[in-house]
Image (tube, rainbow, N blue to C red):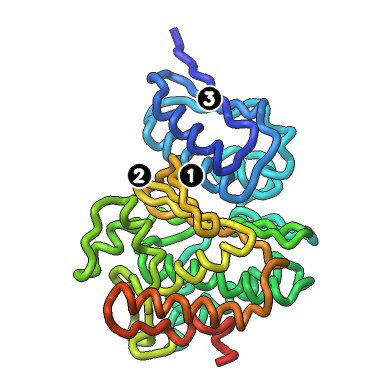
């Protein structure tokens, strides 16, 4: 007799629900067939789609020889358009990275890191130059260039998060997805299956990392950095790593938004000064930035203020002067 288990997908693919979903599939008894049922699902956001897709792929990989089905999903046109279903192997909707239009979104897209690294090498430049160009292009697509302030802050934030993947994750690719709403609220989510935050920070001999949760707390402190996958065009340049990237992104999210990270078996979401642990884990690192650009003043002066605060905090931690890298202090490399 064939044993079949139905896996009910949450009503909303949002941060507060995806952890419950992961816990539920982890507790499932073994079966011959599994059905992912989307009949209750009505809403999806970028992080929820990236995270659940990752977990469905992981679940299938761990169930060798089992059969998988998907039911009651055709009403979910937005996730289908964003490439959600194709991202875990269901032939419905757009392929990942395929969707294009006038709406303010970036579909689920896989970025292969090696061609970008190879391009930087051919141009005899640090990969951050390529990342800057990519971040600016993605920010213009996301906002349709309707809001200059939004383009500036998103370009900066995208750049710092992508740089973190290139410099620390040891991943070969990353996935991203984003949405920009008309009220100025924006979400950018990035996921990689690299070594994770804890293993990256453990390469820093000055740090003693206790566990994944401790690693997440440490990585957003200004001046804290892990081992660096540098190339010869980075050392001594404006792109020299200073450990300010995630700190800067987190602070920008404090303006009407939130900053989420999960890695290993830990997840944390910061909302302003409030920190809350969430039941999310991943083999690698997932980051979600939510910001409201309408609540920000001049982006340049805002970044200057955040850098000033961060350098003071870093000096208090280390007992010596710590400076953010030159590139961390400006919106675009070309403006320096």
- Quadrant for residue 2, please give it: top left
Q: Position of residue 309 (x, y in %)?
A: 47, 77
- Image position of 219 with respect to 53: above or below: below
For the point 45% across and 72% down, which residue is it? 245
Q: Can residue 277 be seen in this snapshot?
A: yes
In the image, taking residue 91 as reference, residue 326 lies left or right, namely left
Q: Which element type, helix, strand or loop, lies under badge 3? A: strand
Q: Position of residue 102 (x, y in %)?
A: 80, 61
For the point 45% across and 13% down, which residue is it? 3
- Image position of 239 with respect to 88: above or below: below
**Disc 3/disc 1 C-alpha distance (Å):** 15 Å
Callout 3 touching callout 1 (CB < 8 Å): no
Callout 3 touching callout 2 (CB < 8 Å): no
Callout 1 touching callout 2 (CB < 8 Å): no
For the point 42% across and 22% down, which residue is it? 28
**Disc 1/disc 2 C-alpha distance (Å):** 15 Å
Q: Position of residue 67 (x, y in %)?
A: 47, 25
Give the residue pinned by disc 3.
7
Give the residue pinned by disc 1.
54
Q: Earlier in the sequence, mark 3 or mark 2?
A: 3
Q: Earlier in the sequence, mark 1 or mark 2?
A: 1
> In which quadrant of the rendered image does the N terminus lie?
top left
Q: Nearer the viewer, residue 304 or 183?
A: 304
Q: Callout 2: 10 Å neighbours few (<14), some, many (20+)?
A: some
Q: Position of residue 329 (x, y in %)?
A: 51, 83
**Disc 3/disc 2 C-alpha distance (Å):** 22 Å
- Circle number at residue 330: none
Give the residue pinned by disc 2.
265
Q: Callout 1: 10 Å neighbours few (<14), some, many (20+)?
A: some
């Amino acid at each position: 007799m064939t044993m079949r288990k139905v896996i009910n997908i949450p009503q909303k693919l949002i941060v507060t629900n995806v952890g419950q979903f992961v816990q539920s599939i982890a507790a499932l008894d073994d079966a011959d067939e599994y059905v992912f049922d989307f009949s209750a699902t009505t809403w999806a956001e970028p992080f929820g789609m990236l995270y659940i897709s990752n977990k469905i792929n992981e679940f299938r990989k761990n169930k060798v020889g089992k059969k998988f089905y998907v039911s009651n999903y055709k009403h979910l046109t937005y996730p289908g358009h964003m490439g959600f279903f194709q991202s875990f192997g269901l032939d419905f909707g757009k392929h990942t990275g395929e969707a294009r239009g006038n709406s303010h979104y970036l579909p689920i897209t896989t970025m292969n890191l090696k061609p970008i690294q190879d391009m930087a090498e051919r141009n005899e430049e640090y990969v951050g130059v390529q990342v800057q160009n990519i971040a600016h292009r993605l920010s213009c697509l996301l906002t349709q260039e309707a809001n200059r302030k939004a383009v500036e802050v998103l370009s900066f934030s995208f750049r710092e998060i992508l740089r973190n993947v290139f410099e620390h994750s040891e991943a070969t690719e990353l996935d991203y997805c984003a949405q920009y709403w008309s009220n100025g609220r924006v979400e950018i989510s990035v996921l990689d299956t690299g070594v994770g935050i804890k293993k990256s920070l453990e390469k820093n001999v000055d740090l003693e990392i206790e566990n994944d949760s401790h690693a997440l707390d440490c990585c957003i402190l200004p001046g804290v950095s892990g081992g660096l996958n540098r190339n010869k065009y980075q050392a001594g340049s404006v792109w020299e790593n200073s450990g300010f990237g995630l700190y800067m992104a987190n602070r920008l999210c404090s303006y009407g938004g939130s900053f989420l990270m999960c890695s290993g078996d830990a997840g944390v979401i910061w909302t302003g000064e409030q920190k809350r642990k969430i039941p999310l884990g991943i083999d690698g690192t997932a980051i979600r930035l939510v910001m409201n650009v309408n609540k920000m003043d001049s982006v340049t002066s805002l970044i200057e203020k955040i850098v000033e605060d961060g350098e003071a905090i870093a000096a208090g931690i280390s007992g010596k002067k710590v400076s953010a890298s030159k590139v961390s202090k400006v919106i675009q490399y070309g403006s320096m």
